[in-house]
Image (cartoon, rainbow, N blue to C red):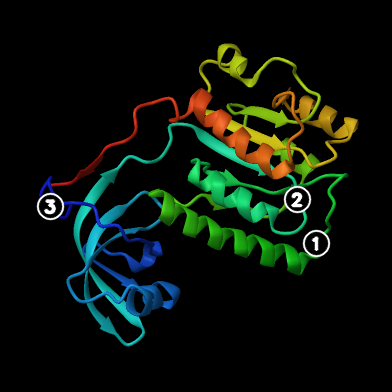
Amino acid sequence: MIGATATHQLPKTRIYVEPDRMTADRATLSGTAYHHLKNVLRFQPGDELILFNGLGREAIGALEMFQGENAIIRLIADTDASTESSLDLTLAPCMAKGRKLDLVVEKSVELGADRICVVTSKRSVIRLTSEQSVDRVERWRRIAVSAAEQAGRSQVPVVERIRPFEEFVTSKPPDALGLVFTAGADPDPPATLRQRYPDTYKVIAVIGPEGGFEPEELQAARDHGFKDVGIGPRTLRAETAAIVAAAVCQHLWGDLGRRPPVHRFSL
């Protein structure tokens, strides 16, 4: 591990670096990250930042030089940034029109989701071609990286390919609690879920489309172990429901009910 003093202050700038561009003591930034450091932040040699590789490693670094179209960063100290939740949370919102899911991806990353998989249902209001689906997922992956940078996360959540709802529910692992947040379900408040499933550490939370799921879709989910869950007496927009569902799960089984993490440095 790279050494550091325990009193070293965390820099404010955080940037994601691809794992293969971060070695034991150096990292190389290019593309938009290079442009941001050089032309937006006007970094000078010696200026410090935080780099993370999206796989759990985070380190303080200092700009060594700009070399061609790259920024060479000297790594000073690995941090023990305990910002990842103990809850393994997969969020599966239904396809929505416009840029509504951009907001869902951004906020669910901030709330600690580990995976995001957009699903299509029979009442989905938008249908994408294969090319459009690939483009949309790539955009959500860029949003996930940006949100992880902003939120101080050491990992970048996985954004999976868009999948049909009935295919998605068949892939639930046996150790995961599957929840379908949908209008008109379970009248008990979501807080009672912790009493019913106290030892939960892995949750797959599916959020229905604006018009709700078809009865046969809900039955297919139940057949694969999913539970219907209500989300309060008011009618929420689908993007609001997805963000609320992520927050509820983190409150019940994750780190929103625990003391905030403390940043430490390896010596």
Task: Residue 3: give x, y in percent of width and height.
Answer: 12, 53
- What label sits on residue 4 in the rendered view? 3
For marks 3 and 2, give the CA distance: 46 Å
Q: Is residue 222 left or right of residue 53?
A: right
In depth, the one of 6 and 200 nearer the eye is 6
Q: Is residue 63 found left or right of 185 in the rendered image?
A: left
Query: How many circles with numbers are drawn on the protein?
Result: 3
- Residue with the most extreme top position: 195
Place of residue 235 in the rendered image (x, y in percent of width and height, measured from the top left):
77, 32
Above-or-below relation of 85 to 13? above
Residue type marked 3? Ala
Under circle 1, the secondary element is loop
User: What residue lies at 59% left-to-right and 29% top-to-bottom?
Assistant: 176
For this view, does 127 lie left or right of residue 112?
right
Q: CA distance from mark 1 to mark 3?
A: 50 Å
- Position above or below: 168 against 235: below
Q: Which residue is mark 1?
A: 128
| Disc sitting over residue 35 in the figure | none
Read off the residue under disc 2.
Answer: 95
* Secondary structure beneath label 2: loop
**CB contact under 8 Å: marks 2 and 1:** yes
Q: For the residue carrying disc 1, how many other residues have a C-alpha within 10 Å: few (<14), some (14-19), or many (20+)?
A: few
Check disc 3 and report its element: helix, strand or loop.
loop
Q: Residue at the location (81% across, 42% down)?
A: 210
Amino acid type shown at disc 1: Leu
Quadrant of the rendered image containing residue 48: bottom left
Residue 230: x %, y % from top left:
72, 24
Residues 195 and 183: in front is 183
- Which of 118 and 130 lies nearest the eye of the viewer? 118
